[in-house]
Image (cartoon, rainbow, N blue to C red):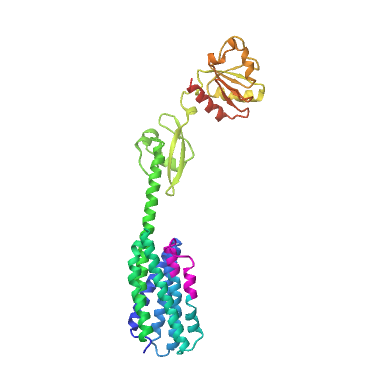
Amino acid sequence: MQLLDWPILDALQTGALAALFVSFGTDALSRRDRMMGWIAFTCLLVGLRHGVLVLGTLPNWNPDLVDRAQSLLVAFGFIALCTALVELFPRHIPRRFPVWIALGMIPNYIRNLVLPHPSLAEVWTHHFYNLTYLVGCALIVHWSLRARQDGDPMGRRLFLGFLSLTIPVVVEIAAQSFFGMKIRLSGFSLVILAMAIGTSWQWLVVRTMESRIQRAETEVEVWRSLVPGNAFRTDRPSALMEGLFGTGWADRVRENPETPLVALDGSSYRLRTRLLHHHERLGWYEREEDTQPGARGFLAGWTVALGMDDPAASVRIQEWLRSWGADVHLWGTVPPREGPYPSVLIWAREPSILAVWREDDLLRRRPRWVQLGGPITAGPHARLDLDLDAASLRNLLRDLLSRH
């Protein structure tokens, strides 16, 4: 019987598979998608198989060499398809499945590279490697059914396709094994299967991306809700920002995102921004208390006594306190027995020395005082280490004064 009964069908399958190879290959390269890459490679190999069959109709081509080449190409194409399915169902198909199929194809390699055609050994090796196709298809259908039962979205969409599209493969193998008829229709099965896998994979990718976008937008809204009224986006209008900073606030933020914004009333606001959509910005603003017009600092009106051994540290802390608006009294190392009594005491000596401070009853008089260094003792006071910085002292004084 002739090698090809329907060369036009082979040509159609070659064109369809070539188009799928270009489409899937471009998508795989653009997204670095391994599954789509293996599907594209499968379409290439099987398309070359049908292209060889078309060329085999020419009178100067050796039919025996054409048959050997197409058999090897379809074997490699089936191995590539199995590799793509491993990427498609990673939790259900073993990673070594393509290796098993490649080992099962050893009789095919021997038949086409070593054995003469026709011969008895060639016939039996042909039957044996056809059995590898049937076992592989059965395992694919079984694993896709397991994926469907486990709720895998690709299993639900593709199981019936795997089940129905293995029928042409079985028919082609049976016709060749039992009747000697060479029906080349498995390429159409691959075209339909590749289209189904590709569209389903794209659907899964799009659904996953939409889910991630929705979660990201939800998270953004949650973060923005933590700073109500202070959050902004430069790509969206904001009546609050316009009323506070004027109509050109978005351009000013884009040009100098790290520079504080000066409001229409002269107040200064520090920005906390992150890049959004190339040159757009997302963030919030914080009021700079020390730069407000007419403000004298948060310690304005408070008297602070300072008792320290180290002159350099004493000068440094005096500068901080005065910059915050405090009226500072230097006590040295021994507190006075009589007044005046400060609003806040910062003491860098032993707490027991305070016993000379009038009435010897600090708990009853409830002074606001901060111990710098020394032992950790119980009492109505706060404690900081001697190597404190301005921020820690400032935060502590804010908290201490807000509780009394």
Q: How many numbered circles are shown?
A: 0
Question: In which quadrant of the rendered view does residue 140 lie?
Answer: bottom left
Is residue 331 in sight in this rendering?
A: no
In x, y percent, where is residue 38?
44, 68
Q: Residues in magenta?
A: 82-103
What residue is rendered at 44% in x and 80% in y?
128
Residue 326 appears left or right of 124: right
What residue is rendered at 36% in x and 81% in y?
174
* Residue nearest the viewer, comparing 249 with 91: 91
In x, y percent, where is residue 59?
40, 90
What residue is rendered at 38% in x and 42% in y?
221
In x, y percent, where is residue 84?
43, 67
Question: In which quadrant of the rendered view does residue 70 lie?
Answer: bottom left
* Residue nearest the viewer, comparing 217 with 147: 147
Question: In which quadrant of the rendered view does residue 249 lie?
Answer: top left
Q: Is residue 84 magenta?
A: yes
Q: Is residue 397 magenta?
A: no
Residue 76 appears left or right of 157: right
